[in-house]
Image (cartoon, coloured by chain):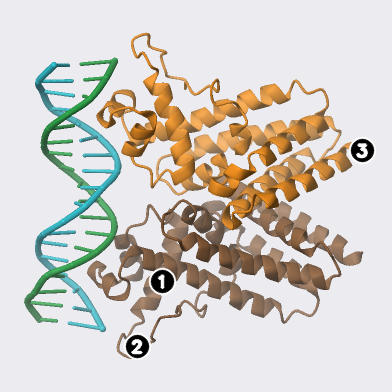
Chain colours: A brown, B orange, C cyan, D green
DNA sequence: GTCTATATCCAGATAGAC
DNA sequence: GTCTATCTGGATATAGAC
């Protein structure tokens, strides 16, 4: 989701688990490749993207990609990991906001901020998940965990507002975001996301008042 | 959307505009190809699907596909047309229901009925639109028109219920469906769609009562 | 560690026999 | 109209020079 993109790209933990910072690889080619993969996958889709596209975007020679990733699948996996880390970074930042309702509204505000990107390419994470679900590799399960993590965080906020139906409300909020991202993208209308974002903000206020 | 799938496959206007029923082509190969394309695109995604996959599913020899469609793009276009016709058929059927609120609830009920499919493959139309938006051909614009048609129909129902904000409510309803389809698919949990469907039904009742 | 050249594979598309 | 055999292009992946 665009939630993930709210994190400044510069510091987001693009370096995945197995990555050795490798003193040698000056220029951080692996990091550049992952960053490029996340962006190009978002703009073109995983299936349509060639390793050549990613190599070009990262300014790394094509053949060199294989030094860092054995196959395309591993680049996709690294991209999912990057989204996961971005989510962690974002929720950690939101957790510094004192009030649960304010935290949720900040989350929504971040989504709305990304509406131009959403109109062009959809939600960075939602479109990725949709594509992964059609693939053979098991990466859709990894992506599902990231989605679960988001739902859990949102649920926790509603629970702190005293709602016993926090889990359902979390699904409602995240689904609303994913759905409005899809419509915003399909109709190429960022205003749609702004309007729905305003609605969600009022909705959160209404829940917090109770 | 799965709305479209509620129409019985057997009669849905799979025969697109330019199709001559062609007395000669006994066995309706073109129709079989389009039907197969819609299904396989849904299950595997457009990009991952080869013409061979579609030919096999339609039980038509691969080379023969090119007699009916000059290129893969045209099969995709035919699939979009098929979704469009399914939507027309569905709304025509729903229009026979006397009350606008009942019509909307019947729409939702149809979505919920398709929840097992949604859990496996997502919304047939939503996942297609998402993929088309990443492609170069202009087919995403065609798909956008179908989405617009759905929104317009839903908006008309809310307008008949006397709501001046019918357009926003239509976006809210369709977005909710698309979002819950994505989550249902990602988490492989049809129950999620059932729960959200129940919520939407109550929501529609609440609007109708006012 | 880096990168070029190339092998391999496979999907889209075509030619032409039937 | 139908189908087989084949061409062609492009993407993944590798071998091996530097």
Above/below status of B177 relative to A40: above
| Residue at x-position 75% and y-position 62% | A167
Above/below status of B31 relative to B153: above
Residue B58 got which mark?
Answer: none
Distance in Å between CA atoms under marks 3 and 1:
52 Å
As rendered, which of B97 and B78 lies closer to the eye? B97
Circle 1 is placed at which residue position? A34
The disc numbered 1 marks a residue on which chain? A
Query: Residue at the bottom extreme?
Result: A23
Q: Position of residue A125 (x, y in %)?
A: 54, 61
Label 2–label 3 contact, CB within 8 A:
no
Q: Position of residue B48 (x, y in %)?
A: 38, 47
Q: Are marks 2 and 3 on the same chain?
A: no
> For the residue carrying disc 3, how many other residues have a C-alpha within 10 Å: few (<14), some (14-19), or many (20+)?
few
State left or right for residue B142 relative to residue B155.
left
Q: Quadrant of the C terminus of chain A?
A: bottom right
Above/below status of A78 relative to A204: below
Q: Secondary structure at mark 3?
A: helix
| Residue at x-position 52% and y-position 57% | A129
Q: Secondary structure at mark 1?
A: helix
State left or right for residue B105 relative to residue A40.
right
Residue A22 got which mark?
Answer: 2
State left or right for residue B99 relative to residue C11.
right
């Amino acid at each position: 989701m665009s939630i993930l993109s709210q994190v400044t790209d510069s510091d987001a933990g693009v370096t995945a688990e197995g990555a050795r910072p490798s003193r040698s690889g000056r220029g951080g080619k692996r990091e550049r490749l992952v960053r490029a993969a996340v962006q190009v996958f978002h703009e073109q889709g995983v299936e349509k993207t060639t390793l050549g596209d990613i190599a070009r975007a990262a300014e790394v020679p094509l053949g060199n990609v294989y030094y860092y990733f054995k196959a395309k699948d591993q680049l996709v996996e690294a991209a999912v990991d990057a989204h996961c880390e971005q989510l962690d970074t974002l929720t950690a930042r939101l957790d510094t906001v004192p009030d649960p309702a304010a935290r949720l509204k900040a989350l929504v505000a971040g989504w709305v901020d990304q509406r131009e990107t959403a109109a062009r390419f959809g939600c960075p994470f939602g479109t990725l998940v949709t594509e992964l679900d059609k693939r053979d590799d098991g990466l859709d399960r990894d992506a599902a965990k990231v989605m679960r993590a988001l739902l859990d965080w949102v649920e926790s906020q509603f629970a702190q507002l005293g709602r016993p139906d926090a889990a359902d409300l979390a699904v409602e909020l995240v689904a609303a975001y994913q759905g409005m991202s899809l419509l915003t993208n399909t109709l190429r209308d960022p205003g749609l996301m702004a309007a729905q974002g305003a609605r969600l903000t009022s909705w959160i206020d209404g829940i917090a008042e109770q």
